Image (spheres, grey):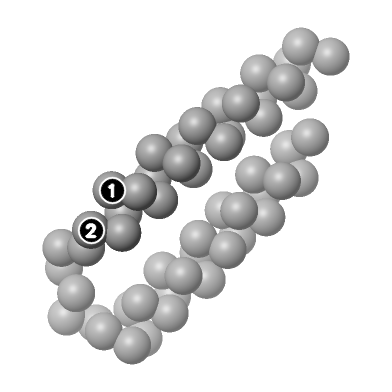
Amino acid sequence: MLFVPALVWLAYAAWEWLVLVKSPEANIRVDCLIIWPLLALLTLWAAVRAFRS
């Protein structure tokens, strides 16, 4: 069950690397307002499901 959030976090790391390479001057980004809450909810959901079963 924790495999899905691990893949999503890996995709997020690749996204961050891509942003760093393509636009290193990007200090304030709006995409983090959407990505971080979704990652947190997905991770919390997977942890609850993993500990329930």
x and y, in percent, of residue 50 in the image:
76, 23
Q: Give coordinates of residue 32: x percent, y percent.
A: 31, 54
| Residue at 57%, 36% in the rendered image | 42
Q: Position of residue 7 (x, y in %)?
A: 67, 55
Q: Can you say which quadrant of the picture contains the N terminus? A: top right
Mark drawn on residue 19: none
Q: Residue at x 46, y 70 (%)?
A: 15
Which residue is painted at 52% across and 71% down in the image?
14
Density class for disc 2 (Cα within 10 Å; few <14, some 14-19, many ≥20) is few
Residue 38 locus on image (x, y percent): 46, 41
User: On the picture, is 9 further left or further right than 51?
Assistant: left
Label 1 crowding class (10 Å Cα cut-off): few <14, some 14-19, many 20+? few
Residue 30, numbered circle:
2
Count the labels in the image: 2
Q: Residue furthest bottom?
A: 22
Picture quarter with the C terminus: top right
Relative depth, front residue between 17 and 4: 4
In the rendered structure, are the residues bearing label 2 and label 1 in contact, judged by CB atoms less than 8 Å apart?
yes
Left or right, 6 with reference to 41: right
Residue at the outermost top position: 52
Q: Secondary structure at mark 1?
A: helix
CA separation in Å, label 2 and label 1: 5 Å
Q: Secondary structure at mark 2?
A: loop
Residue 30 shown left or right of residue 42 in the figure: left
Residue 33 is marked as: 1
Q: Amino acid at mark 1?
A: Leu
Rendered residue at 50%/60% (across/down): 12
In the displayed structure, 16 sits above or below 30; it is: below
